[in-house]
Structures are given as structure tokens and as C-alpha cells.
Amino acid sequence: MGWELEHQLQIQGIMMVTIVGYLSHLIADTLTPSGVKWFYPLHKRSIKLHF
């Protein structure tokens, strides 16, 4: 989606911002009690960090 937007709007960096935003969202979800299924559907366990 970021790649397509970058090419349609001719604005450099949209793809990188999309990737960083998606990864930061996954990392933030990993810090929640329910965690996130990083490797779904290959691995169905939630990965979570306990602090």
C-alpha cells in the first residue's frame, strides 16, 4: 500500500513511513497482555513481553 501511494503521489518516503508505522504497531501490541501473533498462520501462539 505504501509503495503504491508513493508512486501515485510521487512523494519519496511514504513506503518507509508505512513500514515503520506497521512495525511499531506490532511492537506496541507485543507489549500488551494479549500479545500479537507475529507468525500467524504458521505459528498460532501469541508473542508477548512481560515487564
Image: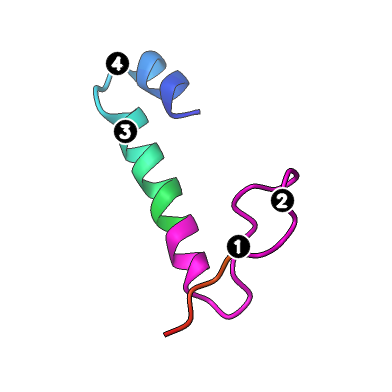
Residue bearing mark 4: 10
Residue 2 in the image: state x and y as whole percent: 43, 29
Q: Secondary structure at mark 2?
A: loop
Residue located 64% across and 47% down the image: 39
Q: Which residues are magenta?
A: 26-46
Residue 21, numbered label: none
Residue type at mark 3 is Met
Position of 47 with respect to 12 (left or right) is right
Q: Nearer the viewer, residue 29 or 13?
A: 29
What secondary structure is found at the residue carrying circle 4? loop
Would you say residue 43 sits in the magenta stretch? yes
Rounded to the nearest angstrom, the CA distance separating label 1 from label 4 is 34 Å
SS for callout 1: loop
Characterize the local packing of mark 3: few (<14), some (14-19) or many (20 or more) Cα atoms within 10 angstroms.
Answer: few
Rendered residue at 45%/47% (across/down): 22
Nearest to viewer (mark 1 / mark 3): 1
**Mark 3 = which residue?**
16
Q: Which residue position holds label 2? A: 43
Marks 2/3: CA–CA distance: 27 Å
Q: Which residue is mark 1?
A: 36
